[in-house]
Amino acid sequence: MTHAFYSDAAEKILRSDLSVGERTAVMSVRASLEEDATPGHARGLPDADPRSESYAIDLLSEQTGGRGITVVYRYSQDLDAVLILWLIAGP
């Protein structure tokens, strides 16, 4: 089991800027990342650190009950941990 954490910026967005449905969708992504840190629907992003990998998962408005949200996170195999860096909410 991988541990997943929110960065300070992501936690602030989660707690203050998202609706209940959007928050629930993001929290379900976090739970799924604890089961599989590199799911097939995540797209890879460039990463400056050779010991980690960065990914983004796009949630459609149908999944959130509100805006589309992109969850940007970094996975470290050494630590077996995920850090959710950003939550980017669309219009």
Image: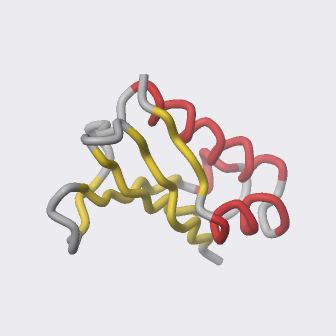
Q: Quadrant of the C terminus?
A: bottom right
Would you place residue 1 above or below residue 29 in this image? above
Is 23 or 61 nearer to us in this picture?
23
Would you place residue 54 above or below residue 80 in this image? below
In the figure, is residue 64 to the left or right of 4? Answer: right
In the figure, is residue 53 to the left or right of 31? Answer: left
Question: Quadrant of the rendered structure where residue 68 is?
Answer: bottom right
Is 19 or 46 nearer to us in this picture?
46
Percent x, y of residue 34: 47, 30
Residue occupying image coordinates x 45% and y 36%? 33
In the figure, is residue 88 to the left or right of 77? Answer: right
Q: Quadrant of the N terminus?
A: top left
Question: Quadrant of the rendered structure where residue 77 is?
Answer: top left
Residue occupying image coordinates x 62% and y 48%? 26
Q: How is the image coloured?
A: secondary structure
Residue occupying image coordinates x 24% and y 56%? 53
In the figure, is residue 91 to the left or right of 31? Answer: right
Total labels: the figure holds 0
Would you place residue 60 above or below residue 79 in this image? below
Percent x, y of residue 22: 72, 52
